[in-house]
Every structure is written in structure tokens, then in C-alpha cells.
Image (tube, rainbow, N blue to C red):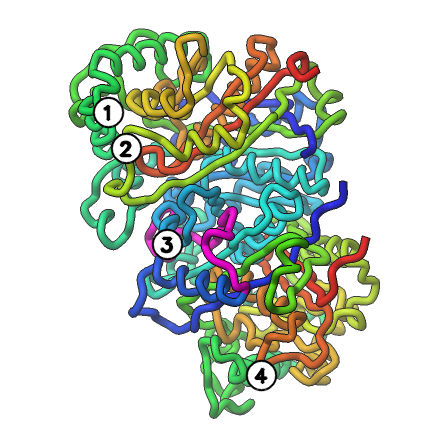
Amino acid sequence: MRDVAIVAFAQTDHLRRTDELSEVEMLMPVLHEVLDATGLRTSDIGFTCSGSSDYLAGRAFSFTMALDGVGAHPPISESHVEMDGAWALYEAWVKIQTGEADTALVYAYGKSSPGQVRDVLTRQLDPYYTAPLWPDSVALAALQAQALIDAGDTDEDALTAIAARSRAAASDNPHAQLSGDVPAGDYLVRPLRTGDCPPIGDGAAAVILAAGDTARALCERPAWIRGIDHRIEAHGLGVRELTDSPSTRLAAERAGVFERPVDTAELHAPFSSQEVVLRKALGLDGRVRVNPSGGALAANPLMAAGLIRLGEAAARIHRGESDRALAHATSGPCLQQNLVAVLEGESTHA
Amino acid sequence: MPKEPVAVVGIGQTKHVAARHDVSLAGLVREAAVAALKDAALTWADIDAVVIGKAPDFFEGVMMPELYLADALGAVGKPMLRVHTAGSVGGSTALVAANLVAARVHRTVLTLAFEKQSESNAMWGLSLPIPFQQPLLAGAGGFFAPHVRAYMRRTGAPDTVGSLVAYKDRRNALKNPYAHIHDPDITLEKVQSAPMLWDPIRYSETCPSSDGACAMILTDRTGADRSPHPPAWVHGGAMRSEPTLFAGKDFVSPQAGKDCAADVYRQAGISDPRREIDAVEMYVPFSWYEPMWLENLGFADEGEGWKLTEAGATELDGDLPVNPSGGVLSTNPIGASGMIRFAEAALQVRGRAGEHQVDGARRALGHAYGGGAQFFSMWLVGAEPPTG
């Protein structure tokens, strides 16, 4: 395997609404920011890959316009996943592994504000038996939270503490949508209170990957991807053990998470209860700093939130605040699909 | 370390029809996947990862359907990626899967693309709402017709060329049991007398709306050694993108298409595509795109593509058969159409194309494009493993 690192990361401020911005306008600043940070131009980039969802944009082929923001002429080697940008990063990592590219630009964006996101996400479900019932994303997460409480894995006070810790951590994150004190709030769907649920908002993120010496030349302390893997579970909630996340555990095993302790974990847990599931699957104890960025409870721009976890973990390594970090992204109802990566600073690789 | 050679050892397609009322989305994709596994003599347990592609989710009304389809495709506990690059997606999906093998991340990968257009209405799924698009631009034909006219004006091609392509592809489709449109009574006169839809594109020169899926099993050298049938080997593959609209865009022969083909030929060591490639599966949703792409892909000089078509070079028994399967003009489950091109190219070099087999095909090109002629993906497959 080639050594590949995240060498630059940028994200927008995440906002409840961005009516005045098109997706391209939302994306342009972060694209420029990662290019400026590395001194690269679009024409220097070996491969470009993005993640987004037509359903959020409310129109087919929504991503085709985003290429205008990249500046794709002369033509570029480029691809797109209809998934969170974390999987676009994975596709780009594979491309670099083939040796066909040494650098990659990865970006993701999502505007949840134009629609009713809880309704929109029901369209992800089995279209014949489940989607017609319109079970929304909060209701499904609440089902999972109740299963955790029933199993004795957590209680409502513990969930509230997770929300409070995340929002407090977000005070140091100028991009976060919500930060500071969080009231326990009213029940949104029992047992989840408003504080246990992610904000709805718009945002974008971009990352640059580079291999070997190119990475060293572009970044003082590259965040090396020591392992990355992703796994999916069955779709039907009735055939899954909702209090566990075997796909996360397997992806973590494949990514090498359990070989040595990590000091930081950026978990894509849009609901406080999902952090409980992920901590268990990943074997994280109190010594690991979880979601110092505030996580998805502080900002959850759909399709970008997973890529942001990778970017936040990498940025901590860039700044020397972490030596070995875990980054996680999720997709689908109740953590159906999960990606795990291990990022390390140079010093720990000697 | 050089890339791992990638072999296509299994190919499966559904019978493509206007509406598969007999299967769900999951049933449709599983049918193609099971056929590909059978061709490769493999089981679900042999598959390390699944890469799936389709065109917009609005075509079926299911957001990110890979989540729902994980069970049907045996992906539970495995990695599953979902690619979406507009009309080129079937090709791009196969290339993403091939890269997983080439990079030695996985040994054996199932890749699949589908569309079940009968679940919704693709014509209007493609008609973006104002203000994203100007009014009166209904469907893909409305977008592409002006570019066909530009081609005719630029090259002086006679207005009969498009009908020759449609007549050829629909006859080829009669030899392909999976093709959607089977019209045994097809005549050139019938093609030429069909109603005009988007001048100069007649109804008979347009692709149908199909339900269908296509699957392939890609594997490494060790996997190819175990294959019960001859594999097709990937000699080159590339994607290129450019914006839909910009000053200087050449809609008749986009730079991204030229660059993509040049990259594939370079990888495959092809210097004279016209002589060195034995069969082409080209993405031709409207008949005039055959002569246009013949030029864009380097099979003819600029302005000369229509002459190849007119001379019969692209017929099944010509010296450069184009779309022996009947092509997109005969079968168009949009998200799968690109992968069908890639798979049909592989069938040709495996010698497993049945009645539409091109005699002695050793090297074949699969081609797909999408968006406003902005996304391109291609691969070149051969009967022999790549050298070096």
C-alpha cells in the first residue's frame, strides 16, 4: 500500500439556512481554501471525487453543476459518489493506490434547509414495505435509543451528558452551527430530546490527499491514512441488533484501529445515543478524546458531515494535537453503513 | 509496484423491457448479479466488495437505494460503494470496481448498474425545473438535438446518416436476446418515416426507456486462473469530466471525450484505434452520436465519421463493428447503459456474445458519456492479459 495522507482540510460555517447561496457558491470558498493551503491548482490535481445527494438538492444530476466550481477545463479525471464525502475520499484513496494519481481533491456538500429533512430521509428506506409508512430519521434513532436504554447500555441522563459535552466542545469550533450550553430540551421523539438530535443545516467541506513525498512537500505534518475500510449491514431494522454496530467494528478491525490505542476519535454520531453504540463497537474508553470538534450534534450538513470527521481528525494531527486519531462516517438509518479510518502524524510512524 | 491485472470473469444481464412488473428493484438487480456469479462459477461468499451505480435517484424515487439493496446483493458485512456520474455512471462504476482490484484492495468485486425506469418517468426526471434550466428543453433529446444539427452543418453529412445508424442498431438488437427493442419487421423506410421529435431526431432514432440491470465480476490474476470461461482483460480505463457549459465548449466533439480516449489508448498501447480495435460498444442514445463519437474517439478524422457509417464500416460485418449488441438505441436502462457497453465489449473479446459475436474480436472498446456531454468513461478490454 502507498502512504497517503490528508494534507489540507477546509469547511464552511454550518448554518441553518443558506438561501442566498447556490451549492457551487457554498463550495467555492472551501475549494479555494484547500488549494491555497497546498499551493496546488486544479490542473495539478491527479483525481477529483465528490459526494452529495440529488434528494437534498431536489433535482436530478445536482452534482453536475458543482464542477463549475472546480474549474474543470482542461478536462479532469473525476468521479462522484451519491454518498457522504467520506466515501468519495475512500474512492480517491483507492485511485491513488493504483498509482494513477499522486494527489486528489475530495469535496462534499449538502443543503438540508430547502426541504423537510426528516421526510426526505424516509425515502432512503425500503420503498415497498417501509418508506410508505414515512418513519422519519428521528423516530428510527429513537427506536435505537430506547433499545439501548432497555439493554442497560445507557440512560437519558447519560445521553444528555453526551449532548452537553459535544456542544461545549463546539465552543472552540468557529464553524459549528450550535455550541455552548444545551438545555435538555423537550422530547422530540421519546426518549430523544431536542439536545440529543443534530441540528438541520447547510454546509460543505473539502480535503486534499497526497501520496508519500508529495504529501511531505505540501504539509508540515501530514495526517497519514494508516488504514481505511467501510462495511454495510442489512437494511431491515428487524434483522439488526440496534444496540451494536458490527459493521463499524469490522471496518475498524480492517483499518487497524485495535492495533494500538488512539488518542482522538471523531465519530459521525448524529444522535447522542449513536455515540454509545459506536463507543462500544470501537472499544473507546474515557482516555480517548471523542468529538473535540463537537461532532454531528453541533453541525450535521448531510453528505459532508462524515468527510468533516476525517478532516477534523486530520486537522488535529496537522496542528500537533493528536498523534493517532480515529475518524468515522456513517450512512443510512440507525448506523447501517460505516467507514473507519486511522490517521497518524509522522512521529509515530518512525 | 505495478497494478494488479484486472479480469472480467462473469457477466450477467436481465432481459431488458419497458416495464418489469414481475420483480422489485431488489429482484431486478439480484437477477443480473446471480447471472454474473453463474457465468463466473462463483458464489456470494467469493465476493469481497460491491460497487453499484445508477443514474438519478429520482428515476425510481428511492434515495440512495444501495442501502435498501445491500441485502439483495449479498453485501451485508462487506464494503459497498455507490457511484453516480450521470449517464456515464455504468462505465464509471465498473472502473471504480476495477480500481479496487488493480490497487489490490480487494481480490474479487461484484459491480452492478441498473435502472427501473417504469417506477417513475425518466423524461421528466431529466427535465430540470426552472431556474436550473431554460424552458422548452424537455428531456435529453431537447438538449442534444441542436448539437446534432451543429454536427451536420459542420461536416456536410447528408441527413440520411442518422437513420442508417438506427436501422443497423435495431437489426443488431434482433441478434441479442437481452435487447429491449426487437422489431423483426424493421426497414430503413420505417425508420425514415417515423415522426420527428426534436428536429433532426426522429422517434425511431431515439433510445427507449428500459428496466434492466447489468452485473460483472472483476477479479485478479489468481481469480482469472480459476475462471471456467475465458476472461476479458482490462488494458486501459479512464474517466474525464468537463463543465456542461463554458465559453469554447465543443458540444460536437468535447475535449473530455478526446482526452479520455487518448488516455485509454495510451494505457493499452493503441496507436491506430481504427485498425487495432475490433469492436466498439459506444454510447449512442440518439443515432447521430455514432458518427460524432467516431470522430471524438479517434476512429475517423474530424468531419469524416459519417462516411464510415455510410460506407457500412460500422455494420456487424464491417471492419469496425459499432454496437453489435444493438446499443443504447435498442436498450436503455439509463444507469446500466454504460455498464452494458463495458460488458458487451468484454463479451466480444471473451467470444461469448452469441449471435452478435464479431468474428475474431481480440480488442474491444466500451464507451459511456453523461451529463451535457461532460462526463466520459471508457475501457479497453482484450482477450489476452496485458503485458508488462
- Residue that label 3 marks: B72
Q: What is the chain letter for disc 4?
A: B
| Left or right, residue A46 beside residue A240 | right
Where disc 4 sits, the SS reads helix
Q: What residue would you read off at disc 2? A: A242
List x then y, in percent, for residue A106. 58, 34
Q: Which residue is mark 1?
A: A148
Q: Which residues are magenta?
A: B40-64
Look at the numbered discs 2 and 1 and tell me whether their residues touch, using CB distance below 8 Å. Answer: yes
**Label 4, on which residue?**
B355
Is B44 part of what is drawn in magenta?
yes
Which of labels 3 and 4 is toward the front?
A: 3
Tag 1: amino acid: Leu
Instruction: Give neighbour class at mark 3: few <14, some 14-19, many 20+ (Cα, 10 Å).
Output: some
Real-space CA distance between mark 3 and mark 4, rounded to the nearest whole angstrom:
31 Å
In the image, residue A92 above or below residue B180: above
Q: What secondary structure is marked by label 2? A: loop
**Are tags 3 and 2 found on a single chain?**
no
Image height check: is B142 above or below A76? below
Q: Are marks 3 and 4 in contact (CB under 8 Å)?
A: no
Q: Which residue is nearer to you in this view: A51 or B98? A: B98
Secondary structure type for disc 3: loop
**Chain of the residue where label 3 is placed in the rendered structure:** B
Residue B103, picture quadrant = top right
Mark 3: which amino acid? Ala
* Quarter that holds the N terminus of chain B: top right
